[in-house]
Image (cartoon, helix red, strand yellow):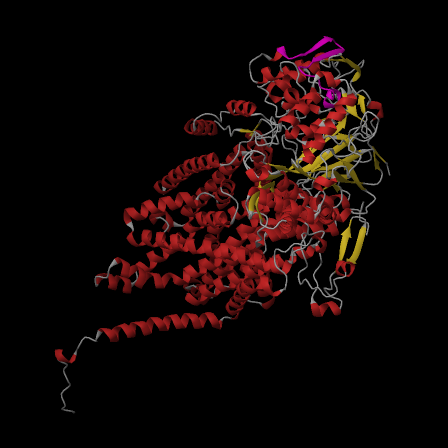
Amino acid sequence: MLKYIGKRLLISVITLLVILLILFLLLQLMPGSPFNDEKLSPEQVAQLKEKYGLDRPVIEQFFRYIVNMLRGDLGVSYSLSANTPITELLVNRFPITVQIGLASMIVGTFSGLVLGFLTAFFRNKVLNFIYGLFTLLGIAVPSYIFAMFFSYFLGYRVDMLPLLYDFRTPILSTVMPIMAMSFGVMSVIARFAKAEASDVMKSDYVLFAKCQGLPNGTVIMKYVLKNSLMPVITVVASLLVSLLTGSLVIERMFSVPGVGGLLTSAIDSNDYSVVIALSFIYSALYIVVMLLLDILYCIIDPRVRLGGRD
Amino acid sequence: MDRRGMKKTVSVLLSLVMMTGVLGGCSSDSVNTELNIALNDSPSTVDPQLTYEINTNNVISFFVATLYEYTPDHELVPCLAESSEVSDDGLIYTFHLKEGLKWSDGRPLLAEDFVFAMQRLADPDVGSNSVYLITDSCMVKNAREINTGKMPVNELGVRALDDRTLIVELEAPCPYFRALVTLPNFSPCCEDYYHVVGEDYAKRADTMLYAGPYIMDRYEPLAMQIHLTKNPYYLNADNISIEGITLQVINANQQAVMCYESGVVDITQITGELTELTEGDPELHVYPQAMLSFIDINHGTNPALKNRNIRMALSKSIDRVSLVENLLRTGYSSITRIIPPGFYKDPDGSDFAGDRTMYDEYAVYDTDEAKRLWELGLSELGISSLTLNFVYATTSGDVAEAICAQMEKALPGLKIELKPVPRKEHSRIRMSGDFDMIMVGWVADYSDPTAFLSCFLSTDHTNSYNDPDYEALIERCQSAEVANNNEERVNLMHRAEEMLMEDAAVIPLWTVGRSYLVHEGVEGFRLTPTGTGFVVTGLTKEVR
Amino acid sequence: MNNETAYIPVKEDFVLAPPELTRSAVKESIGGVKHETVRRFFSNKSSVLGVVIICLLVLLAIVGPYISGHSYDDQDLTRANLAPRVPVLASAGILDGSEAVPMTSGYITDNKYDELGLTNEYYLFGTDKLGRDMFARCFMGLRISLIIAFAATAINLLIGMNYGIISGYFGGVTDIIMQRIVDIIGSIPTLVVVTLLMLVLKPGMGSIMFALMLSGWFEMSLIARSEVLKVKQLEYVQAAKTMGAGHLHLIFREIVPNIVGKLVTQIMLSIPSAVFLEAFLSFVGLGMPAGTCSLGTLLSDGFANALLHPYKLIPPAIIMILLMVGCHLVAEGVKKATE
């Protein structure tokens, strides 16, 4: 097992480096410089470039960047926020984004599991209809459309939930963003949970357990739930990405001071260093989560531990 | 349906919150003198010397004070200065400060604080994006050399004669210097304090000193919520009636309207299509801006655009009135000259640009004339069709599409390639001259026609108008002989504007006013036309 | 007892069947499987619904821009922001071109058709702010979005399928190297790749396709590979291998037909996600340039002003939702039918 984890770890580190390189090379191709304000003369621009080391050879800039990264220095924002270290920008934003993302993940996963399992266990028309409707909606409707409906009806017409993020009411004011973002998660988890549970219900060992005269509830709790929960873990990782994507538009909509909104603003104002840093943070976060899930999976499932996951 | 001030019904939610086990904190009760103002964007900085954007200036205007300021009626009056005089050659300005000026921590505000502020503005190590104000808009002695690193900062031509006398030496006369110093970039900065906080200066609410009506007590870089409270040491503190102000950044326009309607914010700007929602609302206020939207033409590399008939045909093929009425709506008004009306007075007291139809023959919408000029131009060039590119910032996509359709419809053989670019990229393209036509929105930094006229000088950008006669004219406008002869100077500026129009050197489109919704009961909210920000000293809110 | 001796077959009784015969027999049996899958697919009501929805949308994407009588890019500023008006319903008072605008000072109901004297004009979905017909624009947008999605998916399929098959079929060092590459590429979030690419490239159809392709092919390759690994072990493939079939024969005759089901499912899932991503890019301001229309630009335009003119958001939103639903139903159906 250690060997497997070691291998995964190595791949993750290489991936991270490759990402850094790709990010860096892509950014070299980007048009313009962050200082091209109409009112600056060429000399003044050259001076600013020198100050931020943008006039050095690409290789040197790259190594400088990696070294800085290892020291936890993500660079400086040039145009979005004048001369502010990006780390400083992230300190307060990152927790909020993670909090909203995790909450959406938990709410979505939990409600998805409930919906999926219930539909699988009790083959009942009403449940089936609700399941069908919710899963289709979750897949077909982008989270920002949900966000708009919620904010228009719940926030504006009914005046029940705050329309904006407010640091004074951090729980209440994130309810709507979380609702909007968890819908997609819920539908994917529900579909997966239902399919897994139905498979397990049909399996020989469950049939055997039933034949042994075990009560239905015990069978479900002991065998079905346990065995169908495991594969669900694999979907969670892929959902994380969709949450990140969703957070970009949603955070901007609800004025959440998070990382997603920061990235959209950085794209808007050509602030390369911020785009680099955030892309890296997003990738790193994603890689870490994937790694953790793989390790978790490896601990749970001996087949992976022994033979790799093919 | 009036939903303003509706009580929050939280019953359903309460149970939800209980489930999660945590209740959000309660807001304070002193709401009566608290004001909530929505902003479109987070300020990029709160360091007054670094700011270069209107959004940022709007925020900074709450807590800075400058030598001169504009009243709500756009009169230039002394603020921190008591009086000032200028030498006969127009090169030396002497400002006398008011007595008893104090920073927000109670320490005295001295003339040397202005010296340090202007040194920071010129200092290449500080790297202000607004350095052009001190090197180009007005040429403070040695500023250029200091900024290019050829001289130390203490060589700057600004010095404190004593605690209350500030002397500024210029390299060339600048008749609008007093108007220029209303910009927050010229506001004072305390050197001792600056060295104490060092790197952290203006990065947090408590690493700054304030001289204006308010001080910040909640701020972080790119904050979405900023909170301000009254500055007890402000020189007119007694007249400030609003105790606290929350600035809430709302990026989504629609959300801002909903927040305003539900009473979450008292004041919000309305932009884009949504302005239509507010038409006829008594709470809608439009603040005129010294702004010109125009299409800049490449006079350098495209031979077809060197033809006056072609340029004028392009200008005359745009139905500005229809665009303003049907698409841009509230706040916009079409213009067929360079200087927007309402911001600068001739010596006889009349509006410099009072006559809006003065140059109509060169630019007003007339498809027949446009077509005639177009065909004339094409035959002079010996071509039958012409393809031009049209660069614009992505934010003005609809307008650009509409203009393009009008031009193509009126001028047979014209093909326009639309090139939408991000805002920042847009500025770079204009600087580099890599365009045939480019849509530009320009806000004057100071109330003087040269703020617009200098956009077409060769020093402004590559492939600009760059006509020797025009250059000479503007140079003469800025020269010492004319600086103190207002009449001749105004005549020269009129001549310069006429020249631009006559030659169809630029295609003016419209001027803009910014639309704000201001709740009933909130009075005294103003926006200055020159982008120095809000006028906040007169704000009051009716206590209900 | 019966003294008839049982017939003992002799060698001559057996002849190899002529090659034509074997071929047709094999074909019949494969054809049978195919037929069975198709039958199972169409016996499922929701799959049929999915197919109908997709066919309808594709048809509308082809003819939609021409049937309303207005061109999708003809501007007329005087006719800006007209509400939907439908011929028959209008006389009944529904969708007659009037709209209630929730002005900040109170609702205003007006009918711009009447104001402009356009008594015989009908814009089924209304017009946009430049006075262009929304009906034609919606289906033009659908067309563009579908072209982007189809093209991106086709390229993904081509690259991903080949990559996965080669990796899975040959195994060994080839597989290890190829899989490590996929591991690395797969660990970069799509969002990051697409965002950065769109910043670097000129906005337009080609760039969006390229970005979608770069971020999508490896998923296809993973599916192809895992299916190949499964199929490779099956008896008939092993048999074909022992009989000395060549690589190409094995891959394209034995393996590919067996993984078609999974690939079709994946295609049906990646088309909507491509449309989704295109729409998302428009939202962050990295999508199609102005002047062109796609579902993404229409959605984000409608979205930004939904409070003012909700009719500009509803049609493109419904079209997109239908497309999603249709694709998912078909994907589900194919999955069930091939299992």
For residue C140, side relative to residue B94 (left or right): left
Q: Nearer the viewer, residue B411 or B257?
A: B411
Highlighted range, magenta: B155-180
Q: Nearer the viewer, residue B389 or C194?
A: B389
- Is any atom of residue B43 visible in this view? yes
Is C226 above or below relative to C66? above
Q: Nearer the viewer, residue C306 or B488?
A: B488
Which image quarter is the C terminus of chain B in?
top right
User: Is B172 contained in the magenta span?
Assistant: yes
Please provide percent x and percent y for residue B69: 78, 24
State which quadrant residue A118 falls in. Answer: bottom right
For residue C268, side relative to residue A157 (left or right): left
Please provide percent x and percent y for residue B261: 77, 46
State which quadrant residue C247 falls in. Answer: bottom left
Is A309 above or below relative to A95? below
Please provide percent x and percent y for residue A283: 48, 40
Residue depicted at x 41% and y 39%: A15
State which quadrant residue C34 falls in. Answer: bottom left
Q: Nearer the viewer, residue C248 or B177?
A: B177
- Is any atom of residue A221 visible in this view? no
Number of numbered callouts drawn = 0
Is B236 above or below relative to B112? below
Is C278 above or below relative to C245? above
User: Is B11 contained in the magenta span?
Assistant: no
Please provide percent x and percent y for residue C242: 22, 62
